[in-house]
Amino acid sequence: MNLIDLRNFEYELNKIILFENSEFIFSNTECEDGVFKRYFYKYDMNNKHINKINKIGIDTCETACYNDCIFNNYIYTNSYKVQGDEAETSIYKVSLINGEIDRLYTIHKEVSVIFLSERYVVLRGTNFEIDEEHSDIYKDIYGEYDYAILCDLTDKKEYEIRDKRIILGIRDYFIPYIVKGRRYIVFEEAYMEDWELEEMFIQEINKENIYRNGYRKY
């Protein structure tokens, strides 16, 4: 096992995207003339050389959660921009060969992004504007605030996901993987946050009245 001391590393290094042989790939958010941009770097542990992959930064906001994945020599990633009350999520691919950037899709909502393949991504968001309270416990438990979309990056089409097991399961873990050439997805049927369970207890809501065998029957 090789240990690398990154305590004096001058980059944020929020997440290592790929670790292979003596190299790893990471992203860093940098401010240029008041605009935050994301760059990807490759670090060689043998000679401690850092190579910037994309010379042009991807516009984003100061703090955000990103999902990065590598398919066939491309980094697939997302970024967020907020202007006033309007949020925008964009999906990009960055070439590991020449650093070229291609914006694949943009949705005018703030959503989390899960990459399933080069073509398909799952977008998950929350819409609290459907009522005046914005925090109805029953609606939250039933998943009425949550939505998910299957996005086709090739045909530029969106498909609504209606299965509540998937919509609510995305909250924590939704992991695509391949076994013997077939793609599978693992997700956790842990639909409720701790505060939701506490609200159920306070309001004396019986869980079996909402879900049966781990999820609600439709």
Image (cartoon, rainbow, N blue to C red):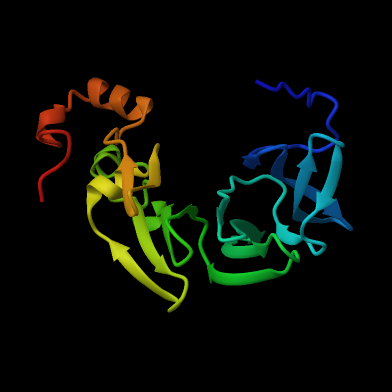
Residue 124 location, x and y as percent? 41, 53
Residue 6 location, x and y as percent? 78, 27
Residue 80 location, x and y as percent? 62, 57
Instruction: Answer above or below: position of 8 versus 101.
Output: above
Q: Quadrant of residue 35?
A: bottom right
Residue 99 location, x and y as percent? 75, 64
Question: Which of the two residues, 91 or 183, is positioned nearer the viewer here?
Answer: 183
Q: Say whether residue 169 is left or right of residue 84.
A: left
Residue depicted at 83% across the width and 31% down the height: 9
Q: Say whether residue 179 is left or right of residue 119.
A: left
Instruction: Answer above or below: position of 203 versus 215.
Output: above
Question: Which of the two residues, 154 or 33, is positioned nearer the viewer here?
Answer: 154
Residue situated furthest right in the rendering: 33
Residue depicted at 14% across the width and 42% down the height: 216
**Does the image show residue 65?**
yes
Rendered-image quadrant of the N terminus: top right
Residue depicted at 59% across the width and 48% down the height: 66
Q: Say whether residue 193 is left or right of residue 56.
A: left
Q: Say whether residue 49 is left or right of residue 78.
A: right
